[in-house]
Image (spheres, rainbow, N blue to C red):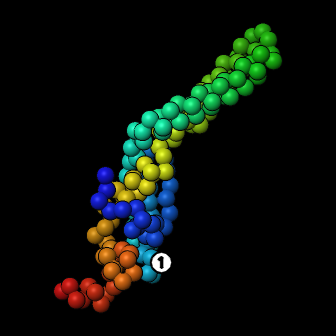
Amino acid sequence: MSAIPYDSIVDNIDQVSVDGAVVNVSWKCPASGRVIGSSTATMAADPSITARVGASVKRSIASELIYGAARIVSGLIGGAAGRVISNAVYTAAGDINTRAVANVDYSEASRREAIALAFESVKSSFEWNDSRRQYVAPTSASRAADV
């Protein structure tokens, strides 16, 4: 778990993209708007019973819809051509089903936690500003004061 609360870095987020369990974040200075860097983190599946049941329900619904449509399409054509089309439809259905349920194990809370973890690797590019209550990129004046 990250020591940095998500709410304290939300203004530093420039862009977020999710690829499976990997969260890619581009970071900016909220004072200047300047992009500072990017980092990644991996989401952990939400372990709560509610989330696990919800993921299971989503998987079941997606599977029934996709394979139900595949059964209908494959049943429309008979013979050898029907078998070839049926195989192609079921292969496509498997791929669609995999993509459809790829992220059901992750919740908004697990995404936010991964974003906070990703910030840890770029934190040194920022400094906490008490008056703004935000992490900002150091200015040349604050760097000179550190020297």
Seen in the picture, residue 79 relative to 138 is either above or below; the reply is: above
With 85 as the anchor, is 107 left or right in this view? left
The count of marks equals 1
Question: Toward the viewer: 51 or 67?
Answer: 51
| Helix, strand or loop at mark 1 | loop
Q: Residue most toward the front?
A: 50
Callout 1 amino acid: Gly
With 130 as the anchor, is 79 left or right in this view? right
Seen in the picture, residue 129 relative to 81 is either above or below; the reply is: below
Q: Residue at x 34, y 56 (%)?
A: 117
Residue 90's x, y, as percent?
65, 22
Seen in the picture, residue 72 relative to 107 is either above or below; the reply is: above
Q: Crowdedness of circle 1 by 10 Å Cα count: few (<14), some, many (20+)?
A: some
Residue 93 seen: no
Q: Residue at x 31, y 56 (%)?
A: 2
Residue 83 seen: yes
Residue 140's x, y, as percent?
31, 87
Q: Quarter-wise, where is residue 57 in the image?
A: top right
Q: Residue at x 39, y 53 (%)?
A: 114
Residue 12's x, y, as percent?
43, 70
Which residue matches tag 1?
A: 33
Q: Quarter-wise, where is residue 124 in the image?
A: bottom left
| Quarter the C terminus occupies | bottom left
Q: Residue at x 20, y 85 (%)?
A: 146
Q: Residue most toward the top?
A: 79
Question: Toward the viewer: 80 or 9?
Answer: 9
